[in-house]
Structure formats: structure tokens, C-alpha cells
Amino acid sequence: MSCIFCNIISGSIPAYKVYEDTDTLAFLDIHPINPGHVLVIPKVHVPEFQDLDDEIYTKTMNTVKKMAQNLTKLEPKRIGLKVEGWDVSHAHIHVVPLLDPHDITSKRAVEGTLLNPTKEELEAILLKLTT
């Protein structure tokens, strides 16, 4: 099956890649809750997170942990995780630098009125996270 995340994995669609290994990919969300919001996906197409086999689940969560540790470079108050799966039918986890306790459940996040950073802003964040 081909979805937008599968196209990002194949390179058909560009992405601001923060981390990649043989089984997972982490890239900046282009409509983040907060600057530095990263999506972590397994490279295998599985629509539902709970249906990942144990090995890929563990590898995906290891990448999530690496990204959470990496996001501390941005000096957030906390790091939040969100698994929802409404927009793209490919297992994925949002790793979000939190500036206040309500960021993940904020009106902006719930209603989808997310940030719309410029290419330059995304590239600046990518540079911070990959150096």
C-alpha cells in the first residue's frame, strides 16, 4: 500500500529527516504543534500502531526515545508523545516539545490550527536537531 509516509520513506516526497535507520524514520512535522515536532514512523506500512510486530514496535519506540532525548536541545519544559492515527493510515508517533502542560491537548492541536513554519524555520530547527 502506498501512503504519504510510504512516499516519504521511498524519497518520492521530500521531508526534513531528523533520523533514519534501517527500520524507522523520524522527520519534522510541517504543521507542528510546536517548533521541533517530530513524527516517528516504521518503514513497514502498518496502518494501526497496535498491529506492529513486537520487533518493529520496539525499534520504533527506541527511535521515539532518541528523538525525545534529541528534542531537549530545544529546551522545552517537557516532551510529549501522541499516537492518534487519524490523518494518515500508517503507524506513527508524534514527539512534541512541550512549552506548557496543555500543548498536546491545546485547542490548536485539537482543532488542527497548527503552526505553519517557513522552509527556513524548518531548516533552522533541523540543523539544531542534527548537529
Image (cartoon, rainbow, N blue to C red):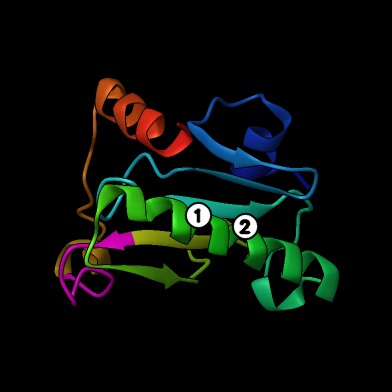
SS for tag 1?
A: helix
Q: Image point 73% across, 31% down: which residue?
A: 10
Query: Depth check: 39 or 87 in front?
Result: 39
Give x and y (percent) for residue 25. 64, 45
* Circle 2: residue type: Thr
* Left or right: 6 as drawn, with respect to 38: right
The quarter in which the C terminus is drawn is top left
* Left or right: 105 as drawn, with respect to 43: left
- The relative height of residue 70 versus residue 84 in the rendered view (above or below) is above
Q: Image point 36% across, 34% down: which residue?
A: 128
Which stretch appears magenta? Answer: 97-106
* Left or right: 31 as drawn, with respect to 69: left
Find residue 63 and name its label: 2
Give x and y (percent) for residue 107. 16, 69
* Circle 1: residue type: Met
From mark 2 to mark 1, how far is it between C-alphas? 6 Å
Which residue is tagged 1? 67
- The relative height of residue 19 versus residue 83 in the rendered view (above or below) is above
Asked if the residue at tag 1 contacts the one at tag 2, i.e. Cβ–Cβ closer than 8 Å, the answer is: yes
Q: Image point 26% across, 46% down: which residue?
A: 35
